[in-house]
Amino acid sequence: MRTILVTGGAGFIGANFVHYMLRKYPEYRIVVYDKLTYAGNLDNLRAVWDNPRFAFVKGDICDRQQVEAVVREYGVKIIVNFAAETHVDRSIIEPDAFIQTNVYGTYVLLEVVKDLGLERFHQVGTDEVYGDIPPGYRSREDDPLRPRSPYSAAKASADLLALAYYTTYGVPVTITRGSNNVGPYQHLEKVVPLFTTNALEDKPLPVYGDGRQMRDYMWVEDHCEAIDLVLHRGTPGEVYNVGTGQEIENLAMVEVILETLGKPRSLVHFVEDRPGHDRRYAMDISKIRALGWTPRYTPREAIAKAVRWYVDNPWWWRPIKEGEFRQYYERVYGHRKVLGTLRDTS
Ligand code: NAD
Ligand code: TYD
């Protein structure tokens, strides 16, 4: 039985990856290693908790001794690193943990992979490292990195460290750079779950700036399949873009949410923009397509599917919305001026 250590597996994409891998590979054991920050949630792993091929260890990827002990104890051969601080708005207010976890934590994992001679280190990266992409262009894997937020700068640093460990020490590293994911178990700070649950409660949807920014919204399980493919068929030292290749405007994302829920456009409030807000992310995905992957869902289909999951699973999101998240919401949105509503401007 092969054992994969999934760091950050109690978060959104990591938990979906754990479900997917346990379902697909009866011969794999999955050990989740997670610090359980505000974003880590054991409810995300409820469905696999009693699976004999699953184990959970609470721990920090910055703690080298503990990472090494877990790798030895479980005979881990592969590490897939999802552990990160992930929200751009939080990185603007408090960047410290982003540098610590996303940069130093990735370095610690690379050191362990190098010293214990593991088979593979897979780094889960983001398209945000390419920065703001002008209309008509799509980022390719060997483009220069131009991150513009503390979050994306820390993620770019992690990618570069991983590639340096491949070049310098021959550590078998692969990297995927995913676009914006949507689906089950996504923290409510991210736009699709936030807007969906606000709309369900007839609360305003705070759209930043003019809402014309473009994102490539991808179904989370499509992303999990791509990571699986790169783990098994990808080439060490290589980077693979993963997305639908079809970005849409945030206002179109909002329309899908409102239509799926049958809620009025008057819920849309245009509010003060995020500082340094990237207007457009767009990737060329021909490299991962050539490896044999293709996305199953378009951004619109993925968003509608995600919305229906939140409608069906209030048990999951209500406790988050009623907890510490209220203080966070007040801090990020409380002071933001409302600039207009959709009715005013359309
Ligand atoms: P998330 O915020 O939902 O989950 C992050 C998880 O990491 C949480 O369970 C948290 O407890 C854990 N964690 C944080 N710091 C840790 C530490 N020091 N040690 C151990 N565990 C720690 O994040 P997500 O949206 O699932 O993203 C997962 C990965 O995918 C991240 O690396 C992110 O940069 C990348 N990514 C995300 C998206 C997206 O749309 N969400 C897109 C592309 C790439
Ligand atoms: P988000 O889910 O935070 O992902 P990222 O910033 O990493 O792409 O935001 C997605 C898009 O939605 C981004 O253009 C910012 C915008 N947005 C809003 O307009 N209002 C919000 O309240 C949030 C959280 C995001």
Image (spheres, rainbow, N blue to C red):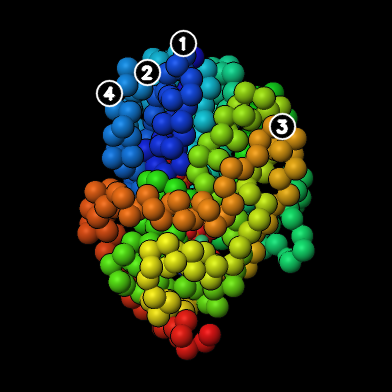
What is the CA distance from the residue labelled 1 to the residue labelled 4? 18 Å
Label 1 and label 3: CA atoms lie apart by: 26 Å
Circle 1 residues within 10 Å: few <14, some 14–19, many ≥20: few
Q: Earlier in the sequence, mark 1 or mark 4?
A: 1
Residues tagged 1 and 2 counted as in contact (Cβ below 8 A): yes
Circles 3 and 2, Cβ within 8 Å, touching? The answer is no
Res. 53 mark:
2
Residue bearing mark 3: 291
Q: From the top left corner, tell me how far across and down residue 301 is, in percent.
A: 53, 53
Tell me the quarter of the picture where residue 238 sits: top right
Question: In the rendered image, is residue 328 in sight?
Answer: no
**Label 1 – label 2 distance at C-alpha:** 9 Å
Distance in Å between CA atoms under marks 4 and 3: 34 Å
Say which mark, if any, is on residue 18.
none
Q: Position of residue 120 (x, y in %)?
A: 59, 23
Residue positioned 34% across, 43% down in the render: 40
Residue occupied by mark 1 = 1
Q: Residues within 10 Å of mark 3 (few under 14, many from 20)?
A: some
Mark closest to the chain's N terminus, 1 or 3: 1
At mark 4, the secondary structure is loop
Label 4 with label 3: CB-CB less than 8 Å: no
